[in-house]
Amino acid sequence: MRVFLRLVREKSASRVAAEMGMSQQAISGYLKRLREALPHEIFLRHSTGIEPTDFALDIARKFERILSDVDDVVLADFDPTRLERCVGMVANEYAQLSILPRFIAKIRARAPKVSVRVMDFCQETHAQQLERGDADIAVGFAKFFDDSLARISLNDEQYCCVVGERSGIADGLRNIADVALFPRVDFADSASYSQDAISQFLAAHDALIPPVATLACYTSLKPFLEFNDVVAFVPSAIANAFQLTRLPLDLMPETFTTAVGWHRKRSGNPLGIWLRGVLKEQVEE
């Protein structure tokens, strides 16, 4: 059933095979058996993959209900050491860099047969991924979570001002107004970075000047700083993860909240409860 549901969602046998660690031949054999067992066509082939028929979509909805009930029964006597499945997580770049490495290490230590699939956080699709069961939890900034999700706060975070290890700026920047005197690099607006929040903060203190560059993600910052002596504003956990030099300014942007979210219909799922507990424990250490 799980293979069938993934085929309906992904519309690609090769992609499903790769995600589930199966050969494409095994997926093709599974599809053949399905066609023989069912009275109507379930998938139509086209140049980019397969398209589920209305009949397949109807079956998928029923399979989802059945699997949800089965999961509740199987997980009622929950023992992570015996659990053998793939856990899905939706996470923004911030969480992938600063939270998930240690979190996944804890999961692997306590549930050695579990594998983890990390998916990029997308504001338009994360709620549907959680509802469908493609992901068990979402980790990121609470302000970007869909209103339909249940959530618990993990910690409060704050942007900080950073420079490179060999920066000549460090000795000349102490007040927020001084930021306007030095070149600054910005980041594209995303679920991991609020361009507006930083711009508004700098503008409120007459320190906003156009950035010399706008980077796509945090991971590109450290190599950028090796060749460009600029300032940047990043969440404090990102500064720690990349061992960047922080500048103690007199004023800093307001704090914001990191959180873990899940779909409300899965609130009682033992696996989800366990994952949230392990994550909360890791963040509080």
Image (spheres, rainbow, N blue to C red):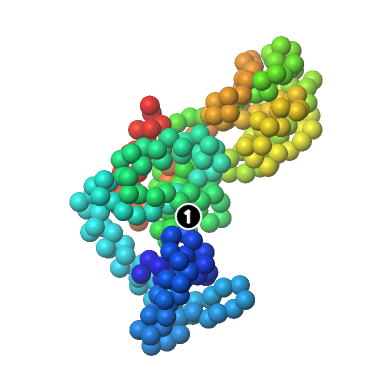
Quarter of the image with the N terminus in it: bottom left
Label 1 is placed on what type of residue? Answer: Ala
Percent coordinates x, y for residue 53 in the rendering: 49, 80
Q: Nearer the viewer, residue 33 or 221?
A: 33
Identify the residue shown where x is 26% and y is 45%: 81
Left or right: 168 with respect to 234?
right
Q: Quadrant of residue 22?
A: bottom left
Q: Residues within 10 Å of mark 1 (few under 14, many from 20)?
A: many
On the question of residue 199 being in view, the answer is no
Q: Is residue 268 above or below residue 173?
A: below
Disc 1 designates what residue? 127
Q: Residue furthest top?
A: 171
Identify the residue shown where x is 62% and y is 76%: 47
Q: Is residue 146 above or below residue 176?
A: below
Percent coordinates x, y for residue 111 in the rendering: 31, 44
* Element at label 1: helix
Q: Is residue 142 above or below residue 234?
A: below
Quarter of the image with the C terminus in it: top left
Q: Is residue 223 above or below residue 251?
A: below
Q: Nearer the viewer, residue 97 or 140?
A: 97
